[in-house]
Amino acid sequence: MPSLYIAVPVLNEAPNLPRLFDSFRRLASDHSAQFSVHILLVDDGSTDGTADVACQLAGDLAFKVLRHEVNYGPGRAFQTVFSYLADKLQPGDWVLTMEGDNTSRYELVRTMFRRAIEEDYEVVLASPYLYGGGIVHTSSLRVLLSKVANTFVKELLGINGIVTVSSFFRLYRASALQRLQQRYSPSILETNGFECMTEMVIKMINLNLSISEVPMVLDTQLRIGKSKMKIMRTIRGYLRLALQLRRWKAPEIPKPSLTRI
Ligand SMILES: Nc1nc2c(ncn2[C@@H]2O[C@H](COP(=O)(O)OP(=O)(O)OP(=O)(O)O)[C@@H](O)[C@H]2O)c(=O)[nH]1
Ligand SMILES: [Mg+2]
C-alpha cells in the first residue's frame, strides 16, 4: 500500500496539539483505504514540551518526531523532514505539509487530492489569496499587510501565475519531491526561515512541475497563541532569496541546431 506522509514543523505548539491530533486521526481514517498514513512532526527546539505532549497524544498513529535541539526555523525543519524521506519515498506515495497551529484545515485535503489525481497535477497548494479563499478573524490592517507582502515577494522574485507563494499547506506527489531532490539535494531547501516555501515554489517552477491551487479560508481563531513569524528575519530571508535565484535555475535545454537544406 502506498504511503501518505504528513509533515508538520512545530515550534511551541503544545496548546494546539490536542486538536491537531484529532485532525491527524480524521485524516488517517479518511485515507486508510488508500494509504498507510505516517505523521512526522519536526520539533525545532520548542521550550513548552511540544514533543513530549505530541508523543503522549500519538496513541496508535504511525508517528515520529524529528527533533532539533535548538531553534533553526521552519525552513530547516522542512530540510530535516525532506532528508528523512529521501530514502523512503516510493512511486505512488504522497507528502502533505501542514501548519501545526490548526490553521491548515484537514477538510480541504480531499479537494487537494481530487485536484491532483483527476486533473493530473504534481503539486497542489492551499491558497488564501485565490478567489474563494480568504483570511478571517484577523484585522484588516494585518490582511492588507499580508496581501502586500505576497504581491511584493512575487514581483521581487519574478514569480508569475501562482497566487499564494508562502503557504505551508501543500500536497506533493512523491515523484515531484524526488525530482527536486535529484536536482537540488535530499533536503531540497537552503533557506531556514519562513521564506522556505517560496524557495520551493521557485525551484518547482524551474523544474516545470505542474502546480495547481485550491482556495482556503485561513481562520486565525482556530489557533491558540500568536504567530511565530519573526518579521525582520523573514524580510532579510526574502532579500537573500532574491540574490540566490540565478544559482537555482535548471540548466537550459540546448536548442536543436538548425540544419541547412
Ligand atoms: N520547526 C519550526 N516550526 C516553526 C517555527 N516557527 C513557526 N513554526 C511552525 O510553522 C507553522 C507556521 O507558523 P506560524 O507562527 O503559524 O506562522 P504563519 O502561519 O506564517 O503566520 P500567521 O499567519 O501570522 O500565523 C506553525 O506550525 C509553527 O509551529 C520554527 O522556527 N521552527
Ligand atoms: Mg499559522
Image: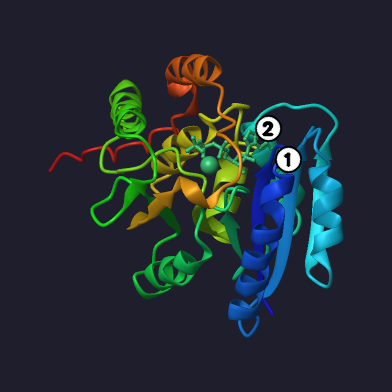
Q: Is mark 2 within 8 Å of ligand 1?
A: yes
Secondary structure beneath dot 1 equals: helix
State whether residue 71 is above or below residue 162: above
State whether residue 151 is above or below residue 128: above
Determine the quadrant in which ligand 1 lies. top right
Residue 132 falls in image quadrant:
bottom left
Secondary structure beneath dot 2 equals: helix
Cα–Cα gap, marks 2 and 1: 6 Å
Q: Which residue sits at x=49%, y=66%?
A: 109
Relative to 259, 220 lies left or right? right
- Disc ID at residue 102: none
Tell which of 105 and 212 is nearer to you. Answer: 105
Q: Position of residue 32 (x, y in %)?
A: 65, 81
Tell me the amino acid under the disc marked 2: Arg
Residue 38 falls in image quadrant:
bottom right
Q: Position of residue 242 (x, y in %)?
A: 42, 18
Which residue is under mark 1? Answer: 80
Q: Position of residue 161 (x, y in %)?
A: 26, 43
Tell me the amino acid under the disc marked 1: Thr
Residue found at the far left of this picture? 261
Which residue is under mark 2? Answer: 76
- The answer to whether one can see residue 84 in this image is yes
Relative to 207, 256 lies left or right? left
The reply to whether the C-beta atoms of the residues labelled 2 and 1 are less than 8 Å apart is yes
Relative to 5, 149 lies left or right? left
Residue 175 falls in image quadrant:
bottom right
